[in-house]
Image (tube, helix red, strand yellow):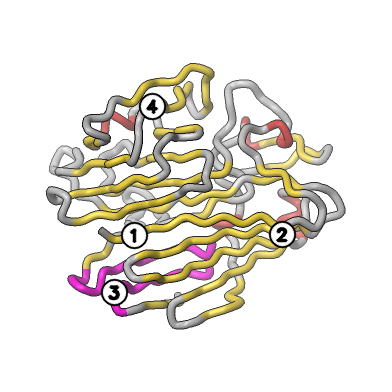
Amino acid sequence: MHCIENEQICLKVSPHGAEMHSMVDKADGREYLWQGDVTYWKWHAPVCFPIVGVVHDGMKTLAGKEVNLTVHGFARDRDFQLIRQGKDALVYELRSDEATLALYPYKFVFRISYHLNGKTVEVSYEVDNMDEQPIFFSVGGHTAFRCSVDAQGEFVDTKLVFSKEPMERYYFEGEFIAERKEKIALQNLTLPLRQALFSKGVLAFRQPASKSVQLLYEDGKHGVQVDFSDFPYMGIWTKSEGAPFVCIEPWYGVTDGLKQTTFEEKEGLCRLAIGEKFSTQYTITIK
């Protein structure tokens, strides 16, 4: 485990998946990240790469091959190399190898960076195309934040506050996206969290008008704000069994639609030409 800190926050990151495990406000010792209780969900803040969501039967035709792509891709299951560490910054790297090429036949370098700026964690993703052909991929965050629930598993005094409306979510049929959408009603840009919101799975938004969302609880005294101006998709998710956490997920890409396609036709994919580099960033701020 690697740790960086400044005067205001302390962040711990595991090289396995380059995954954040802890984000503590040093003023009061409050932990903001879900601690991976396997009763509900073993992860903390996995990174999605080279896909977001699921593909039909776990298989896709990719570069003329049938390949197995598990939910959210393989990066979260791989050990990254720490290539740079400072007092307030960490940079991790994953390079394609025989194991990744068997799953995803493209050569790449994938870097994940964390940088502290006051009470803000800046999360950056970079992808280099090291192949002799264009490569296709999705990438995104899946950070889980702790919340309180009551004895019935319902959220206690927890709400999302968006910067803009309207909000339209994809309609899901099982694990996949259907063509119709559902309007999400906000009250003064606010969405009180209820478990029923997730009865059909993740709240997934394409080109959301809001590029910033706050998760607030204890009458707004505590929470986080996630800003994701570059990202064309965003998800809000929790387990449906009364889990005491909520994930806020900026994405480049989205889960499969009902119609099966080749990998290159998958909605939301990034295309990176030979020798090109992709980079993006989002931020998490303790409120």
Q: Is residue 140 above or below residue 277?
A: above
- Direction right: furthest residue: 132
> Regarding mark 1 in the picture, which secondary structure is present there?
strand
Query: Mark 4 to mark 1: distance in Å?
Result: 29 Å
- Direction bottom: furthest residue: 87
Give the quadrant of residue 190: top left
Which residue is labeled 4 in the image? 200
Q: Residue at x 13, y 42 (%)?
A: 151
Q: Earlier in the sequence, mark 3 or mark 1?
A: 3
**Is residue 133 inside the magenta stretch?**
no
Which residue is labeled 2 in the image? 128
Quarter of the image containing the C terminus? bottom left
Q: Earlier in the sequence, mark 3 or mark 2?
A: 3
Q: Earlier in the sequence, mark 4 or mark 1?
A: 4
Which residue is labeled 1 in the image? 285
Q: Is residue 61 above or below residue 12?
A: above
Residue 95: x %, y % from top left: 70, 64
Residue bounds of the magenta highlight: 7-29
Query: Which is more foreground, mark 2 or mark 1?
Result: 1
Query: Mark 3 to mark 4: distance in Å?
Result: 38 Å
Look at label 2 and name its amino acid. Answer: Asp
Query: Which is more foreground, mark 2 or mark 4?
Result: 2
Query: Mark 2 to mark 4: distance in Å?
Result: 36 Å
Look at label 4 and name its amino acid. Answer: Lys
Residue 94 vs residue 283: left or right?
A: right
Q: Tags 3 and 4 in contact by the CB under 8 Å rule? A: no
Which residue is labeled 3 in the image? 8
